[in-house]
């Protein structure tokens, strides 16, 4: 079931399938989940959940020294008719229902935001146009919270687009009613200096379908924590992601799918390309199949393509199974290089070096990009991939 | 008529912090329509000749000339050589993850032909070429060389040979690792290309087996970094009977 390949130098791939009474997913965190930042000690960097992250580059998000500046980010929501868009206070009872912060920065975000955004798609409303949430950094420090809620049998596509420069810690809750279908595209197209840390919680209703697409290109440090739990049987989650990590960038995606009810499905596919000195990508894929989650069907995969020397990948799939009464469970992680021999092979067929590189990277990402289903985002991604490649040559 | 002329070619390679001369003065002329077999023991430098002609960065040319129709091949980049009409069928073609065979073939054909082939004609051309090599259509959707068997890799190389129609084809140990059926299919592919009379073929092999299917006009024995002896097809028969012993002994002391 597990497949792990390793390449020498600059890459680690670890994989684990645990069949245990005690949850390693939970015990690997240094404190239990909490909305209160005071419940988490300031991390020193050796904790399991922080050991890959350059704390010194978080600009104080992790130790309480980053103070909101008021001009951190500008959030603009564009929504089709029928959608309710609100800005609410901290005491709004719709906040924090999809999940609880699991680390210090997520709790810091929850403890520090002043206003939260709530976007609601009423039950049985089927949108034909995406809801767009533009988060534009204006150079300051910000804490945020966003809720996207779909009523029963509602269908929507939400694009959350991060651009500009900011130091941002923000969590997002996705609450799906029974039979709802939500596709979320979160694009991290930050300027070079931005720092972005966030926890994305999805609570999937009975027979509901959640599709998440996380696309990370920019920023100095981006650390996202997409998490899924199920509110009833029959739920499906598809978590897709791609990242293009350049020289000096740290891009970390930590996923958790908690199969806490029977007969749910999950599929996780993240792909990353890396290039340049000290480009660092981290992928942690935790899948927990609880004892009561009979009939679970899950698969997770991480693929990395290392384009140059000096880049580093840490990829850790972790599957924890507490019941044998499941349909299927598996994981895979592989990190490969685009190396001189591949370049030679393609060039020996008349293909120029730049075209060869583009061919490989576009091909690597193509199957994922095609699944986004939002045309302008797909176009932008392909243009972005080409720009990244041109910058490297 | 296309002609590849190799004159006094010297090539070195870096290994274990030392520079080692592998090719020590190779002279060879291959003309369009001709088939030359280069035979020799392991380590004699046959493959180095193939990869040096294709421009692999591992090899350093320290002397001599290579021209294709008078153009200096050694001045060209790897892709320029391919577009000029040189083709190397590799012994160990590498996997290229994420790139489908069909995308690869079309990109390559576009580069070599100088314009994108018309889609409808191209699809037909590829389909027919694959059928002739007993390749399943699903092959086109697989990633280049990824998970291919030894035989599939070689068929894929010959498929490219048929589609790219080079002036000079260098086949590096295309017969190695093939069972008799696969060898026959691959050889038929090579012969179809040869029968056009448009290609000069440099067939590099350790064994005489493939020469039963692909009849060479010239046979050269390669030993100790140069051509030790040249002759007609009968030289292959002599090698079949006697082996490489007399050439290896001569070179072992060098």
Image (cartoon, coloured by chain):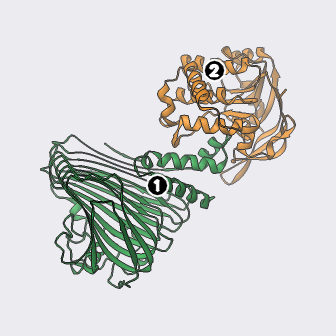
Observer-nearest of B60 and B80: B80
Against A281, residue B9 (above or below) is: above
Q: Which residue is mark 2?
A: B189
Q: Are marks 1 and 2 on the same chain?
A: no
Q: Secondary structure at mark 1?
A: helix
Of all chains in the rendering, the one displayed in orange is: B
Res. B170 image quadrant: top right
Against B232, residue A211 (above or below) is: below
Query: Residue A117: x percent and y percent?
Result: 28, 71
Distance in Å between CA atoms under marks 1 and 2: 45 Å
Q: Quadrant of the C terminus of chain B?
A: top right
Of all chains in the rendering, the one displayed in green is: A
Q: Subunit of mark 1?
A: A
- Residue A216, disc: none
Q: Secondary structure at mark 2?
A: helix
Q: Which residue is mark 1?
A: A376
Q: Is residue A172 left or right of residue B128?
A: left
Observer-nearest of A183 and B239: A183
Residue at (52, 66) in percent of width and height: A278
Q: Residue furthest left?
A: A292
Q: Residue furthest front?
A: A81
Q: Do tag 1 and tag 2 residues touch (Cβ < 8 Å)?
A: no
């Amino acid at each position: 079931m597990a497949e792990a390949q390793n390449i020498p130098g600059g890459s680690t791939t670890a994989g684990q399938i645990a069949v245990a009474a005690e949850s390693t997913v939970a015990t690997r965190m240094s404190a239990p989940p909490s909305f209160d930042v005071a419940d988490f000690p300031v991390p020193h960097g050796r904790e399991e959940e922080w050991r890959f992250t350059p704390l010194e580059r978080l600009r104080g998000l992790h130790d309480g020294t980053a103070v909101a500046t008021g001009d951190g980010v500008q959030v603009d929501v564009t929504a089709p008719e029928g959608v309710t868009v609100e800005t609410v206070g901290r005491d709004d009872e719709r906040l924090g229902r999809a999940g609880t912060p699991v680390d210090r920065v997520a709790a810091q975000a929850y403890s520090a935001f002043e206003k939260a955004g709530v976007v609601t798609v009423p039950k049985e409303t089927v949108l034909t146009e995406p809801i767009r949430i533009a988060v534009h950094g204006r150079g300051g420090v910000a804490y945020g919270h966003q809720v996207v809620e779909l009523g029963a049998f509602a269908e929507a596509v939400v694009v959350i687009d991060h651009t500009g420069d900011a130091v941002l810690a923000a969590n997002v809750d996705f609450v799906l009613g029974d039979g709802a279908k939500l596709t979320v595209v979160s694009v991290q197209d930050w300027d070079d200096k931005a720092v972005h840390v966030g926890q994305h919680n999805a609570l999937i209703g009975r027979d509901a379908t959640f599709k998440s697409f996380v696309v990370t290109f920019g920023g100095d440090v981006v650390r996202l924590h997409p998490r899924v739990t199920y509110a009833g049987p029959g739920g499906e989650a598809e978590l897709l992601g791609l990242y293009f990590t350049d020289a000096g960038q740290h891009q970390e995606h930590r996923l958790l799918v908690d199969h806490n009810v029977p007969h749910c499905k999950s599929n996780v596919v993240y792909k990353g390309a890396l290039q340049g000195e000290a480009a660092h990508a981290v992928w942690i894929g935790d899948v927990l199949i609880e004892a009561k989650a009979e009939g679970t069907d899950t698969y997770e995969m991480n693929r990395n393509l290392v384009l140059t020397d000096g880049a580093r990948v840490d990829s850790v799939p972790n599957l924890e199974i507490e019941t044998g009464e499941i349909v299927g469970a598996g994981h895979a992680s592989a990190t490969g290089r685009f190396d001189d021999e591949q370049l030679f092979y393609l060039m020996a067929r008349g293909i120029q070096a730049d075209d060869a590189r583009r061919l490989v990277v576009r091909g690597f990402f193509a199957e994922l990009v095609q699944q986004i289903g939002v045309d302008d985002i797909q176009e932008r991604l392909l243009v972005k991939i080409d720009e990244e490649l041109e910058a490297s040559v | 008529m296309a002609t590849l002329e190799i004159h006094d070619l010297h090539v070195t390679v870096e290994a274990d912090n030392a520079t080692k001369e592998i090719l020590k003065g190779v002279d060879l002329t291959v003309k369009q329509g001709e088939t030359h077999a280069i035979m020799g023991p392991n380590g004699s430098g046959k493959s180095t000749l193939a990869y040096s002609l294709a421009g692999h960065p591992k090899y350093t040319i320290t002397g001599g000339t290579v021209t294709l129709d008078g153009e200096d091949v050694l001045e060209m980049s790897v892709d320029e050589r391919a577009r000029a009409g040189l083709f190397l069928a590799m012994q160990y073609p590498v996997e290229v993850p994420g790139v489908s065979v069909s995308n690869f073939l079309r990109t390559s054909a576009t580069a070599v032909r100088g314009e994108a082939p018309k889609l409808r004609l191209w699809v037909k051309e590829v389909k027919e070429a694959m059928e002739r090599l007993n390749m399943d259509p699903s092959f086109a959707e697989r990633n280049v060389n990824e998970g291919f068997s030894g035989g599939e890799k070689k068929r894929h190389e010959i498929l490219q040979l048929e589609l790219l129609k080079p002036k000079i084809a260098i086949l590096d140990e295309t017969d190695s690792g093939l069972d008799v059926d696969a060898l026959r299919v691959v050889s038929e592919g090579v012969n179809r290309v040869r029968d056009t009379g448009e290609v000069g073929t440099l067939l590099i092999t350790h064994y005489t087996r493939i020469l039963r299917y692909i009849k060479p006009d010239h046979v050269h024995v390669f030993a100790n970094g140069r051509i030790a002896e040249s002759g007609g097809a009968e030289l292959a028969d002599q090698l079949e009977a006697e082996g490489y012993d007399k050439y290896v002994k001569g070179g072992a002391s060098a």
